[in-house]
Amino acid sequence: MQRLSLVNLWRREFAGYTADKFRQDLLAGLTVSAVALPLALAFGVASGATAAAGLVTAILAGLIIGILSGAPYQLSGPTGAMSAVLIVIAQRIGLEGVWMTGLLAGLIILAIGLLRMGRFVAFIPSSVITGFTSGIAFIIFVGQIDNFLGMQTPGSESAAFKFLGYFQQGLAPNWPAVITGLIVVGLMALWPSRLNRFVPGSLVGIVVATLVTVAMAWPVANIGEIPRTILLDQRLSLDTIPWARMNELMVPALSVAALGAVESLLCGAVASKMTGIRLQANQELVAQGVGNIVIPFFGGVPATAAIARTSVGIKSGGQTRMVSIIHAVALLAAALLFAPIIALIPLSALAGVLMVTAVRMNEWDAIHFMFFHRFKTGILTFLVTFIATITLDLTQAILIGGILSAGIFINQVASLEVDIHPIGVERMRMRGMDVKTDCQYIRVAYLTGPLFFAATNTFNEAFAHEEDVDFLVLSMRGVPLIDLSGIEALHTLHDQLHTQGKTLMLAAVHPKVMRMLERAGLDAIIGKENFFWSADRAILAAERRHLQLKAPALLDSAELASEEPGLTAMPI
């Protein structure tokens, strides 16, 4: 894939930039800001910080990450997935822990991008991502029930136990708060999708709910004061860094880094399909890293690319990264000009926004496809990841998902197939091969799949009982790679056959595999004369050797004098 520097990305992106394109970017940026405003406020609260922290995060992410991004369409800010991780850190360590986690995660993401390791972040099965996303959606939904009901219930170790707790205690909801939340939920559910690109239902719902609560003077909790600045009083500084608890923050930082990197690259993958413009993954990770290093020093929470905002920007006709910059400026203007109005927004209204967002963030099509077609491995990994996410610490859930992903990968890659066949004489003769005997002393085994440590048991078991043959031919055209364990398995098989006076032959060995055998000296041990271009040639050579020993009278003088075509380099 062609890698472009940031300067070259800018040049390509803004080549032929016109006033008409700027007008399209302006309209798209304003549209995205309308979508981002309620989400930024809500995710700031959901992260264990404040609505102001969410707004500052969206502004800075739009500016910093937008300018440095690896694609013109990426839009970043606080997200639901990130808030579900951060709320746990905020409850355990406080805001200092959230800020420091964001800083450490930013450093990790930046290192991944600078080392050009972005492609390794994508090595996670879709079923694991879907399960994790659904688990996060559940956490967000449950986490907002208290605000939606306008009450406070005891905390719990996990979202699952918190949810069950609502059925085990008497509830005394604040009905004005519930009505306010229902107004938002109803408007978001009923708002025509064709109008979302102009005015999002979440913004309409919050405006209507706020007007109703103010007009009715309902006693509901609201956001409170929004500072008219992007440099919050509560922010990370050298004096507030929790050095003594740094060990506790490393695993959460790794989790936030992994989540931020994966979510950003997934967003880029979705957006690239919509636009046809490829995301420069490593540059995107550099942008995300720099942004998350800077944001905590202003009082914001960790950010990542957001699929919802990015898709709105694309569908609204956005052309360049000016969309991200304009949306950030619009949010800054909202913070400076409308802070007193924003302060009146009820928390139950934000809870309604988050609940609807949580339901919508589930990948319902992928879940339906997985269960409808009964993909057992996918269903298992989805359920395990989902249950781990809602019952355990999210950092543990990410580790379980990662281990599960590795296990799935190894299981799928380790599916070595060994298909052993006796020689069909009539079939060989139909193919023009001059076979003189019934060839019962020859077996051909067709191998398919990599021969590495996880596949050696299958390999060894397949040849445990091949005792009635003199020649064993391994057709290795379907073996793309081999490791040390595979080489040792081949060596052991050769030694066993050689001890019994039998011969191992290899056919159609892949060049990469052949180089590994040569490095190990196994080509010399097996013998160059026992390597062949194809299984057919190996069979003819095996028959010739058999007749030379058992029935030389069946061979003419030319065949007796001929040499076998051993090869050191095999075709694919």
Image (cartoon, rainbow, N blue to C red):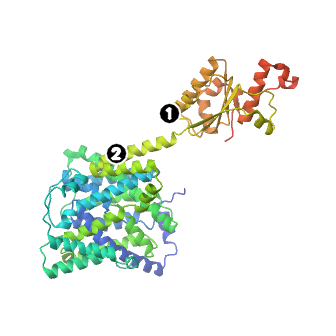
Disc assigned to residue 453? 1
Tell me, yes or no, if residue 120 can be seen here.
no
Tell me whether circle 2 and circle 1 mark residues in contact (CB < 8 Å): no
Q: Quadrant of the N terminus?
A: bottom right
Question: Which residue is denoted by mark 2 in the rendering?
Answer: 399
Tell me, yes or no, if residue 187 can be seen here.
yes
Secondary structure of the residue carrying numbered label 2:
helix
In front: 298, or 302?
302
Q: Is residue 366 depicted above or below 14 in this figure?
A: above
Badge 1 amino acid: Phe
Circle 2: is it few (<14), some (14-19), or many (20+) Cα within 10 Å? some
Structural distance between the alpha carbons of marks 2 and 1:
23 Å
Quarter of the rendering containing residue 418 = top right
On the picture, is 7 further left or further right than 428?
left
In front: 511, or 66?
511
Q: Quadrant of the C terminus?
A: top right
Residue at x 31% of width, y 51% of height: 389
Residue 224 location (% of width, % of height): 16, 70
In front: 289, or 531?
531
Secondary structure of the residue carrying numbered label 1:
helix
Residue 405 location (% of width, % of height): 42, 46
Residue at x 42% of width, y 52% of height: 127
On the picture, is 237 further left or further right than 32?
left
